[in-house]
Every structure is written in structure tokens, then in C-alpha cells.
Amino acid sequence: MQESLIVVLVVCVAFLSSIPCGYLRQNYKKYSFMWFLLIHISIPIIALLRISAGLSWRVIPLTLGGAVAGQITGGIINRRRKQNG
């Protein structure tokens, strides 16, 4: 498999794995232990995936961006679901 395709897959996994965490994070008080944990819990999984895929440290900003985007998306889904009942 081409390295660029592997990078795209790892970033997509980072994004998708962070959506549930972002969704759940909205239910906790800002800066509480669980809020902090839900932000960071997907990072070791993403790092392990990146390392096992043989990708260099240069991919970290992309995977971090995917994880942040997933957190934001999960939070938006949670807020919209609460608004719409």
C-alpha cells in the first residue's frame, strides 16, 4: 500500500475514534478529570497505530488535526442532539 494512503487511513481512524470522545466530553464540566481524560484517551491508540503503520513523527500534526476535528464533530453532534430533543 502506498504511504500516502496509509497516512489518510490513520488520519481517518484518528478522526473517527475521537468522535465518541468528543460527544461524551460535552456531558462533563469543563476542566474536570473526565473532560480531560476524554480529550486525551484516543491519543495513545492513535500513536500506537501510527507507529505500527511505520509512519514517521512528521505525520503527528495530521493525526492530531484529525483527532481535534473528531472531538469538535462529536461535540457538535451532542449539542445538536440536545437542541432537537
Image (cartoon, rainbow, N blue to C red):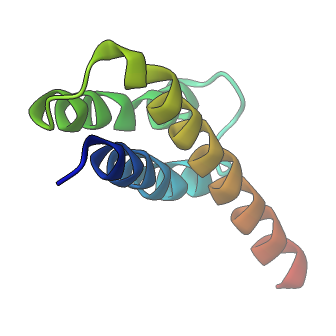
Percent coordinates x, y for residue 31 in the rendering: 66, 21
The foreground one among 29 and 66 is: 66
- Asked if 14 appears above or below 38 in the picture, the reply is below
Q: Residue furthest right?
A: 83
In this rendering, the count of numbered labels is 0
Quadrant of the image for the C terminus?
A: bottom right
Percent coordinates x, y for residue 18 in the rendering: 48, 49
Q: Is residue 52 left or right of residue 63?
A: left
What's the residue at 89%, 74% (across, down)?
Answer: 83
Percent coordinates x, y for residue 24 in the rendering: 55, 54
- Asked if 75 appears above or below 67 in the picture, the reply is below
Percent coordinates x, y for residue 22 in the rendering: 59, 49
Quadrant of the image for the N terminus?
A: bottom left
What's the residue at 44%, 28% (across, down)?
Answer: 40
Q: Is residue 8 left or right of residue 73?
A: left
- Asked if 71 appears above or below 19 in the picture, the reply is above
In the figure, residue 75 lies in which quadrant? bottom right
The foreground one among 62 and 32 is: 62
In the figure, residue 65 lies in which quadrant? top right
Q: Residue furthest top?
A: 57
Q: Is residue 25 left or right of residue 85?
A: left
